[in-house]
Amino acid sequence: MPEITVRAKSKTYPVYINEFALTDVKEQWTKSLAKYSHVFVLTDEHVANLHKAKLDAVLADLPVVTYYVAPNGEEAKTFRVYEDVMTKMIETGLDRKAVLIAFGGGVIGDLGGFVAATYMRGIPFYQVPTTVLAHDSAVGGKVAINHPLGKNMIGNFYQPEAVIYDTQFFATLPEREMRSGFAEMIKHALISDHTLLTALMDTFTEPKDFYTKDLTPFLQRGIEIKANIVAQDETEQGVRAYLNFGHTFGHALEAYGNFGKWLHGEAITYGMIYALTMSETVYGLDFDLATFTTWLERLGYNTTFDATVPFSNILENMRHDKKTTFNEISMVLLEEIGKPVIFKAEDELIFDTYKSVMRNGGDLFESNSRGNDNRK
Ligand SMILES: NC(=O)c1ccc[n+]([C@@H]2O[C@H](COP(=O)([O-])OP(=O)(O)OC[C@H]3O[C@@H](n4cnc5c(N)ncnc54)[C@H](O)[C@@H]3O)[C@@H](O)[C@H]2O)c1
Ligand SMILES: [Zn+2]
C-alpha cells in the first residue's frame, strides 16, 4: 500500500493511502490501539450514518470504545461543540492514556486534533479522513476551531500518530464536497508543479471524473508536496505559508459567509483566482487564467465573484488573517507556477485586484473599470 512518511520536527508518522487502507492496517493498528486505556472516536452525523459500521468492524476487539457524534460541517468547529466533546470525555472518565480517532472530513480532523492537543494537555490521536479535502487537512498537524471573528483562530500544531486514508469513503461524498476537496489538490499543483497541474487538467474534465478516475496518485502527490513543506517548516515560520495560497482572500470570504455560504474549497477557488490575478499584476505571472477558469467552470466550480460582497468587509477579514502582521496583509503570490512568494500587499492593490475579479455579468478579464466599486 502506498505509504508516505511525514517528517515533522516534532514527530515522524506514516500516511497510509489506498482503497483498502483500513483493512490493510487493521491488525497492526488495533495492536497499537490496545495499549491505550480508552479509544474515543470523534465523528459527525453523516460519517456515522454512512460509515460507522466499517470502523466498528476494525475496532470490534477493543474493550472500550466511545463515540462522539458532532454536528455536520463547520458548526462542529465552535466553542460550544469543543466544550461539549470535552465534557463527554471527562464524564466518560478518559485519562491521559486514552487515544482519540478523528473519523471524518477536515472539520472533524481539525476539531479532533485540537481536542486531542488540549485534553489533559494532550493525548495521542489518529486521523482517519473521509473526504478528498482531508488529504490536505489530515496531514501536517494544524488543528483548530473557529472564532466568530475568524477561521481557525484558536488552535495548535499537533501531529497525529498516523493517517489512515481509505479512499473507499469517497464513494458517498457529494459532488460539491468532491469539488471542494479537489480545490486543495489544484492548490498543491499551482504552488509546486506545473506538470501536476497539466495532468490534473488533462485527467479531470467533467464532474463525473471525480468518481470514475483514480484520484489516489494525485492525492499522494498532494500529500507529498505538503509533507515536504511541513518537513522544512512545521510551525509556519517561513515556507509553510505557501500552503496558504488562495487562503487569505478565501478565508475572508468564508468569514463573510459565516462559514456556511461557501464550502472551504469553493472559497479558496475564488481566493486562488484572486491571488493569480494579483500575481499577474505584481510579477507579470505568465499563466493562461482564462483557460484555467474555463476548466474550473467545466468541473462545476462557480468562478463568478459575488458582487454584493462589500469590499470593506473582505478587507477587514483579511486583516484578521493570521498571516497579517503589523497591519500589513501577506499574500502568497506566484512568480511562476510552482514558484510561490510572500508579498506584503497594500490596501490599494487589494482593492484594485478586487475590482478586477468582479465580473458582475461582464467578463472577468476585461478592464478593471468594469468591476463594481463596493467600497463603502
Ligand atoms: N488543518 C489543515 O491543515 C486544514 C487544511 C485545509 C482545510 N482545513 C479545514 O478543513 C475543513 C473542511 O474540510 P472538509 O471539506 O473535509 O469538511 P467536512 O469535514 O465538513 O466534510 C464535508 C461534508 O462531507 C460530509 N462527509 C464527510 N465524509 C463523507 C463521506 N465519506 N461521505 C459523505 N459525506 C461525508 C461531512 O459530514 C460534511 O457534511 C475546514 O474547516 C478547513 O478549515 C484544515
Ligand atoms: Zn485549505
Image (cartoon, rainbow, N blue to C red):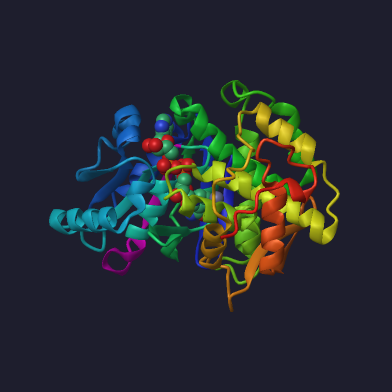
Residue 118: x and y, percent? 32, 65
Vertical placement of 52 versus 343: above or below? Answer: above
Residue at x 43%, y 64% (from the top left corner): 153
Q: Which quarter of the figure is the N terminus placed in? A: top right
Q: Is residue 265 left or right of residue 259?
A: right
* Residue name at image x 68 percent, y 51 percent: 274
Q: 52 or 304, which is in the foreground?
A: 304
In reply to whether residue 125 is colored magenta, the answer given is yes
Res 52 → quadrant: top left
Give the left or right position of residue 79, taking residue 19 as reference: left
Report how many numbered discs are placed on residues in the image: 0
Q: Where is residue 191 shown, x and y percent of the image?
A: 71, 52
Establish if 248 lies above or below 324.
above
Image location (x, y in percent) of residue 346: 69, 69
Residue at the extreme bottom: 326
Q: In which quarter of the image is residue 87?
A: bottom left
Query: Is residue 246 part of the magenta span, yes or no?
Result: no
Ligand 1 falls in quadrant: top left
Residues rendered magenta in the picture: 116-130
Q: What residue do we see at 40% from left, 58% from top?
A: 146
For the C terminus, give its image quadrant.
bottom right
Asked whether, in this view, residue 1 is left or right of residue 113, the answer is right
Q: Can residue 14 be seen in this view?
A: no
Q: Residue 240: percent from the left, percent from the top?
A: 62, 63
Q: Which of 96 and 229 is in front in this view?
A: 229
Q: Nearer the viewer, residue 139 or 207?
A: 207
Seen from the viewer's position, the closer of residues 313 and 36 is 313
Q: Is residue 209 visible?
A: yes
